[in-house]
Amino acid sequence: MAVLRIGDMNEITEQTDKMGKAFLDLANRGETRWIRYILTLLIVIATWTFGSGVVLFSVYGSEPEGLPMDGTNPFLDFIALNLLFVTVLVGLWIGISNAHKRSFRTLITPRDHIRWGRILQGFGLQMGLGIVFAAIDALILPDNYSYSLDPERFYKFAILVLLLTPFQTTTEELLTRSYFLQMLGHFTRHPIVLVILNALPFALFHLMNPEIAAYGVVPMLVSYFVVGAFLALVTLKDNGAELAIGIHAANNMFAAVLVNYEGSALSTNAIFMIHEVNVWSGTVAYIVSAAIMYWILFRSKRPVP
């Protein structure tokens, strides 16, 4: 039987201490006083507040049919929802560049270049595993899936998903993952504490999603927490946000284009529709999928360029 030696324990502790260090150290560049964090968040709120009016007027016009994003026109609703995230991204860029006086790239990587290949790797793995797990679920519960493709609507939405979804998911990653993780890094460098503290606000940010009303607060918050925890863990382990950016984009694109479900926040015309959602089993399936992905991504001990 293998015995865990003191030397092995020290090595594990050292690896844990180094996890995410280069990425978290980026918060020490430029202006780091807490007033700068408050100022940045105020800038984000301001650009979102002002930008919301501009976006809603530009998309719906001065006299929209019904209330904005009330489901009357899912096509315009999708455009408006994603453009609202662009206003947040602009505010975050202004805050990082002017309040913190550091490069916007420091929210993504400590390297001198963005690893686009790593983004594509995360995207491909998430999309591939999503298809595999959906296929298994469809084989087990075939009556829970229906073919819902409307070609005319599908192609319109597919183009919008490809163009706009990356803005939405990247904004979420840079604000709720990168910025908050680096901010929390001033207090603690313990990865488990960072993952938990980062996943909590990520889950709470989704309280307004329609899934909360459709499937219950507790199961949906647990589901969002698990997703946020995994993305935070991947970001720290990889010392960069590229993988999380790719994974998050693939997750949302999968739901928007391939397999959606009733009550989803993404009101798109996907190829297949799930009629009854069991959030708890879905969360367990995601944990299994995430574990497989984590093993594939980090099974090699060689440093990622």
Image (cartoon, helix red, strand yellow):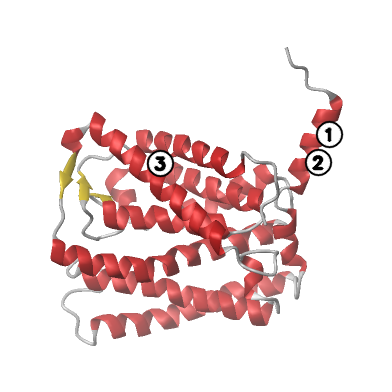
User: Given the image, on which type of amino acid does mark 3 rest?
Assistant: Val
Mark 3 or mark 2, which is nearer the start of the sequence?
A: 2
Tell me residue 24's x, y (percent). Answer: 71, 58
| Residue found at the far right of this picture | 7
| Type of amino acid at the residue the image marks with label 2 | Glu
Residues marked 2 and 3 touching at CB (< 8 Å): no
Query: Dot 2 corresponds to which residue?
Result: 14
Q: Position of residue 94 (x, y in %)?
A: 59, 81
Residue 4 pos. (x, y %):
78, 22
Is 14 placed above or below 33 here? above
Relative height, residue 86 to residue 172 (above, below): below
Residue 39 visible to the viewer: no
Residue 10: numbered disc = 1
Measure how far apart labels 2 and 3 are at the Cα level: 36 Å
Mark 2 neighbour density, 10 Å: few (under 14) some (14–19) many (20 or more): few
**Residue 92 picture quarter:** bottom right
